Image (cartoon, rainbow, N blue to C red):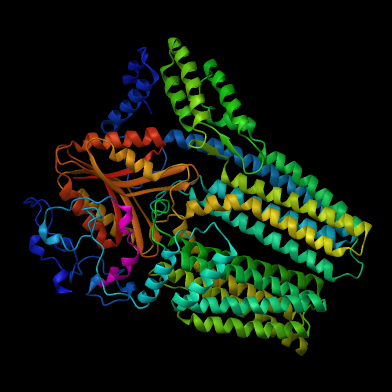
Amino acid sequence: MENSRVPKESFVVDGDSRFPSFKSMSFGYRASENESLPSWNGELGFGGNDRRFTFARQSSFHQSAELHTPISIISNGSFQPLLSPSVSSIKIPPTVYPQLENDNNWKGYQKASDGEGNFSSEKFSFLLFVLSAIRIIRYGNRPMKRLFMMISLNVAYSTAELFIGLFSGRVGLVSDAFHLTFGCGLLTFSLFAMAASLKKPDGVYTYGYKRLEVLSAFTNALFLLFMSFSLAVEALHAFIQDESEHTHYLIISAVTNLLVNLLGVWFFRNYARINLVYRKAEDMNYHSVCLHVLADSIRSAGLILASWLLTLGVKNAEVLCLGLVSAAVFMLVMPLFRTTGGILLQMAPPKIPSSALSKCWRQICTLEDVLEVSQARFWELVPGHVVGSLSVQVKKGLDDHPILRYVHGLYHDLGVQDLTVQTDSV
Amino acid sequence: MIKSGKAVKMEDQSPHQQQIIEISRNVSDGGPSLGGVKVCGEAPCGFSDAEASLKDAKERSASMRKLCIAVALCVVFMSIEVVGGIKANSLAILTDAAHLLSDVAAFAISLFSLWASGWEANPRQSYGFFRIEILGALVSIQMIWLLAGILVFEAISRLIHDTGEVKGFLMFVVAAFGLLVNIIMAFLLGHDHGHGHGHSHGHDHSHSGHDHDHSRDHGHGHNNHSHGISIVTHHEGQSKHHDEHDHVHEADLYEHLLQKSSEDAQRANASDEQKKKQRNINVQGAYLHVLGDSIQSIGVMIGGAIIWYKPEWKIIDLICTLIFSVVVLCTTIQMLRNILEVLMESTPREIDATMLERGLCEMDEVVAVHELHIWAITVGKVLLACHVKIKRDADADMVLDEVIDYIRREYNISHVTIQIER
């Protein structure tokens, strides 16, 4: 990758010594400057020194070429091979990094999905559904395939349960089947989000479809909160009515449910944690799916435990177990809910400490020509992709290009990829 | 936001188009020097300016009042049902009381979202808390879906438990009562004619010219108002122009005012699709909830009546419930789509990004426009960010002002960040 790095000497901005020697502002890739902000660097889990890999996974976030009107590149010849011609001259260019694992799979998926023309999410025809199912099976990456397998397993199981319950007249089975069906619907939405987020940004969705994964994670978390709440209500109900509703057939279904869900947890075992650092959008989605199956399995385990305790003769076993399960699911889900809610609420990215932001602020303000910096707003599109906008007041009659590049470089170090800086002259 | 010093220009007998340009010129000129328009004094700027936030606050308090009354009514009815259900020892009545409880929960969520969206912006939430509205609406819609599912499950369990304990008559009466309650609340939440123009012009002076405009606005609003997923037509720019005229407050501008308002009204009629002001999304969500409940009550009523007359046709109850649940879900789809579009940071539906880009490129000094992003923080508040590449010898400030004016004039987006590059 040596040839892709721009020699630092080529970075000259009109002979200005006004700017502090911000060496890492080589217009391409920083190599070993770890002067800024090591505090959040460790989270990203790559080798600390090679900060190029910090943004390795961002290559999928950059917008496609069709979006931009082609412009002439700045005349600095050495930049020619690095910049894609349609990117703004100020923008730090997308990197040309080695492909991620599974990228070949994704390419096949993308080709297939692009080849279909307008895969509009609004046309829900059955044919489209079958086609997309086939596509997922053939081209999807591993989590998608596993999720699809899980969903089909769950659907089969819940349909069987529903019919058995209907024909044998057992309401408990039917309610369990409904619960499973809701869960399946949500998992299908997660799968759909995984598939749709691979689409390239277009005219209407200028930021792409990655947000859909965050949205599906949020919906999953919401459903789990509802479930915990309903379990609490059920516990209360059992407490008041003081009867046992669980007979032996429900235990069988609970055991089967537990097994199916444990399989799901095994599939997504990387994400079986409560507090997770999210590096990209899919992390959130997978985490939510894992928590979903985990919560389901906890619920089944709780039911089994309750019935066992009842046979042991423990009073109020059901209330205890249901209450425990409800509390456990709630605690499990709350961090995910809060994080996804934060992203959807356009909150400032939690990964970038506000001290770093104010440090950048101060650095910009110390420039000679800058009078004021205002309306600095940053938000996270998906974990790892920060967008920001900023307004800088400069003295009149100055060339703002160096200032722009400086500001862009400054924030790029923090991880803000898309930045729009408005320079007002006074 | 007009500066009174330059307002004198408007006394000329100039055509309205020129007037518009004059106004926006004044605003942009006054901007940097006063530091009040474009630049905020402190680090994290509040998202909206004083005028818009006042309008917001009024609208919010009106919506909150409506929801509070709805919640109070719901609680009253629910307690009646609970008492009646315990006395009659009927599970059906208690189930309906539980449904009303869910209504209360949905309203509480909407109320909370409304209240929370008025919180001040802080460095963590640099855009303010307007998004909470959208999230709250999403949560209520999830609840609607959940309740529809629960109702279908209940219908199925009614089918299974055909031990004859289901009393069709009781079901019918309870559902009728629920329907009545829901219809009352639908009227309460949906009826916003009184508030429609009251809030936005509330801070105007008692200028009789404005009353003329009110009736004309209201007339047009009426034509496009329909219950359900309704949108009240309200020319967003009108209030601003009226305010500016208000400050000038000249008698000989009266005719200009009326002419202008008629022109605006015509424009409002013509550009209906462009400038639509939606009812507050939380009130709309609560309204949908109530509507869904009434539709389902009708379904349960029909099922109860059928079971009452012919207790062996139980399957029809289930079919009815299924059909009506599907109807309820269909009513939520439109709102869900809006919510999804906002949450996905997509270009709002009323703005055509390609046309905007083309219009910008048609300007003289602009060579290219890229990285154009238009997104909404909530329904009605749109932001824009883009990079504009200009010719080398062009005056950056002028181009910046022109671009900002153009966007504000044509598309009514006021929160723009433009990066000018050569």
Q: Quadrant of residue A182?
A: bottom right
Q: Where on the picture, by quarter, is residue B398? A: top left
Give me the residue at 28% from left, 62% from top.
Answer: A414
Q: Is residue A220 visible?
A: no
Q: Tell me the quadrant of the picture where the N terminus of chain A can be found.
A: bottom left
- Tell which residue pokes out farthest to the bottom in this image: A312
**Residue B389 falls within the magenta-colored stretch:** no
Residue at point 92%, 57% (across, down): B308
Image spot of residue A225 (x, y percent): 60, 66
Give the position of the C terminus of chain A as an image quadrant: top left
Residue nearest the viewer, comparing B202 with A416 = A416
In-image side of B237 versus A298 (left or right): left
Q: Position of residue B6 (x, y in %)?
A: 31, 20
Q: Residue at (63%, 75%) from the top-left corner? A: A155
Q: Position of residue B229 (x, y in %)?
A: 62, 44
Examine the rendered structure and indicate whether residue B199 appears above or below residue A5.
above
Residue at position x 46%, y 35% in the image: B52
Residue A266 visible somewhere in the drawing: yes
User: Is the magenta region chiefly helix, strand or loop?
Assistant: helix
Q: Is residue B100 above or below residue A104?
A: above
Looking at the rendering, the stretch of residues picked out in magenta corresponds to: A53-68
Task: Look at the picture and state if A329 lies above or below B358.
Answer: below
Task: Please say if B80 is above or below B191.
Answer: below
Drawn side of residue A7 relative to residue A410, left or right: left
Please state the horizontal and vertical placement of residue A7, each as a whole percent of the image. 10, 66
Q: Residue furthest left?
A: A15
